[in-house]
Image: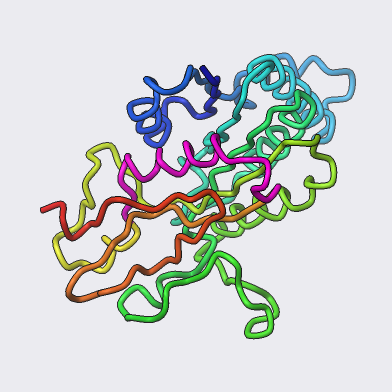
Amino acid sequence: MKTVLLTGVNGTVAKAMLKELSDTYDMCGISLVRMDEVIGDIAQLETPTWKAQMDEYRKRLMEQLTTAIRGKDCLVHLGWNTRDDNMGKGLDPLNLLQVDCAYLAAIEENVPRIYQASSVNAYDYFTIMETNAEPVSPYPDTRVDPYGHKPTSLYGISKRWMEMAGQFYVPRLHPGQKIMAVRLGGVNSSDRPGAKPGAPGRRVWCSHRDCAGLLKAFIECGDDAPVFSTVFNTSNNRSPAFPQPMFDTVNPYGWVPQDNEAEQD
């Protein structure tokens, strides 16, 4: 049985994955060490500068991650400080540091599959949410927009950074290692779209089955799959008001979303 480690194990997405995939894989998880947990020790540094504090935190985080993922078949990095950094506010630089450590630890331990939880907020979908525009591709045509997709927020910028960091680290991957940056939609604990029927916001919904289905397809992909990809992970949300999905879920793993927000009520 293949082994999977999830960071951010107490979060909604991790709980959905555990529920859906624990019979298929040996699933386990951790909560990443926070700066608050080591601040007392950091204060004892000979030169407690900002850089020294960050270096000490990085050291603790790398120790935690490399130990936890040793021998695993897949790292699913979901950990994120959403209290201070989310689509509505803030920017926590420690989130970016954790992303970097997740990549470096997985490469160091030669973990075959590296899943990074990006977000639909990497694209400013608010501009098209109430229209029937063509589904957004995860691979923008830079001939149309030389800067690629505009994100929704600082949070979206952080998620774009996560994706670009994956591209940066591709040359350092071991043979057989693969990275997937997943632009997650709205996964919630109820496994329901949440908003009222017909509301445009339901178009970002991602069911637990579809969330877990993409992860499974990535874990089981063959050697011919690309070493890096970016994939929108939403359900196949279609309704009379919006007859086609907002996002193109094209991917190289054969995954096809199974659920539709309009069929949940």
Query: Residue at the spot x=59%, y=55% of the render?
Result: 230
On the image, the x and y values in percent for residue 209 come to 32, 40
On the image, the x and y values in percent for residue 232 come to 48, 57
Toward which corner of the image does residue 174 lie, by quadrant?
A: top right
The image's colouring method is rainbow
The foreground one among 89 and 140 is 140
Q: Say whether residue 195 is left or right of residue 65.
A: left
Asked if 89 appears above or below 107 in the picture, the reply is: below
User: Number of callouts in the render?
Assistant: 0
Toward which corner of the image does residue 131 lie, by quadrant?
A: bottom left
The foreground one among 126 and 171 is 171
Toward which corner of the image does residue 97 lie, by quadrant?
A: top right
> Which residue in the rendered view is the most extreme toward the bottom?
144
On the image, the x and y values in percent for residue 74 come to 60, 29
Q: Say whether residue 139 is left or right of residue 56.
A: left
> Which residue in the rendered view is the most extreme toward the right?
46
Query: Residue at the spot x=70%, y=80% of the render?
Result: 146
Query: Residue at the spot x=61%, y=59% of the render?
Result: 157
Q: Say whether residue 94 is left or right of residue 11.
A: right
Query: Residue at the spot x=17%, y=68% of the render?
Result: 198
Stretch in magenta: 205-227
On the image, the x and y values in percent for residue 208 come to 32, 40
The foreground one among 170 and 33 is 170
**Does 225 appear in magenta?**
yes
**Does 81 appear in magenta?**
no
